[in-house]
Amino acid sequence: MFFFFYYRLLTIVVLSGLVVSGALLWSVISYISRTNGLALTLSGAAGIIVSIGVTVDSYVVFFERLKDDLHAGKSLRGSAQRSFQAAFRTILAADAVSFLGALVLWYLTVGSVRGFAFFLGLSTLSDVIVAYYFTRPAVLLLSRTKLMRGKKVLGVATREMTA
């Protein structure tokens, strides 16, 4: 509900991205389960749930950067690409730290904690893929539509509104 209030129409991108991420994870987990006998345990599910926070954080980083550009008076169309380029470095850094944590947990622990680490790492890789191949194109396409032109995006009047 907070995303609908705060990010308005772009919440559709967040929800769609979470569905795409979930579908990607489901596909990979299903494939590994069939070929290598992997079982999703409670600790693995916890790793996926923790990584949902990392994924949502990626959207927040991108949308806040976009909001800053819009506050500076730039157009939504031009801001979408610039904002993603700047935000993607931060997303990569956050995901690298999360993945590094998963690797350390994987190598230093045994049992169910290893399952947590594996699924946390897998979900973190999924976040990078979804951010680059889904979120970026989705926001770029939305920024070019008539639906977004002349409206308050992220609660900020766009340049098209003031012109």
Image (tube, rainbow, N blue to C red):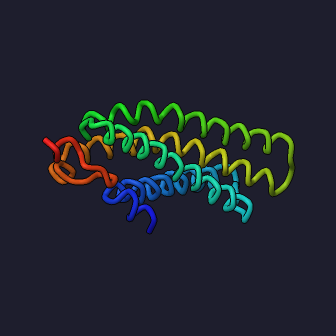
Q: Quadrant of the C terminus?
A: top left
**In the image: residue 98, left or right of residue 11:** right
Task: From the top left corner, tell me how far across and down residue 117 is, in percent.
Answer: 73, 49
Q: Nearer the viewer, residue 94 or 40?
A: 94
**In the image: residue 45, left or right of residue 160:** right
**In the image: residue 128, left or right of residue 158:** right
- Give the residue at x 26% y 33%: 78
Q: Quadrant of the N terminus?
A: bottom left
- Give the residue at x 63% y 35%: 96
Q: Nearer the viewer, residue 150 or 37?
A: 150
Task: From the top left corner, tell me how far across and down residue 21 is, in percent.
Answer: 49, 52
147 up-or-down from 137: above or below: below
Task: From the top left corner, tell me how far across and down residue 132 is, in percent.
Answer: 43, 38
68 up-or-down from 112: above or below: above
User: Residue reaching furthest bottom?
Assistant: 1
- Give the residue at x 71% y 37%: 100
- Give the residue at x 41% y 30%: 85
Q: Nearer the viewer, residue 144 or 104?
A: 144
Task: From the top left corner, tell me how far across and down residue 93 is, in percent.
Answer: 59, 34
**In the image: residue 42, left or right of residue 150:** right
The picture quadrant where one finds residue 34 is bottom right
- Numbered disc total: 0
The picture quadrant where one finds residue 103 is top right
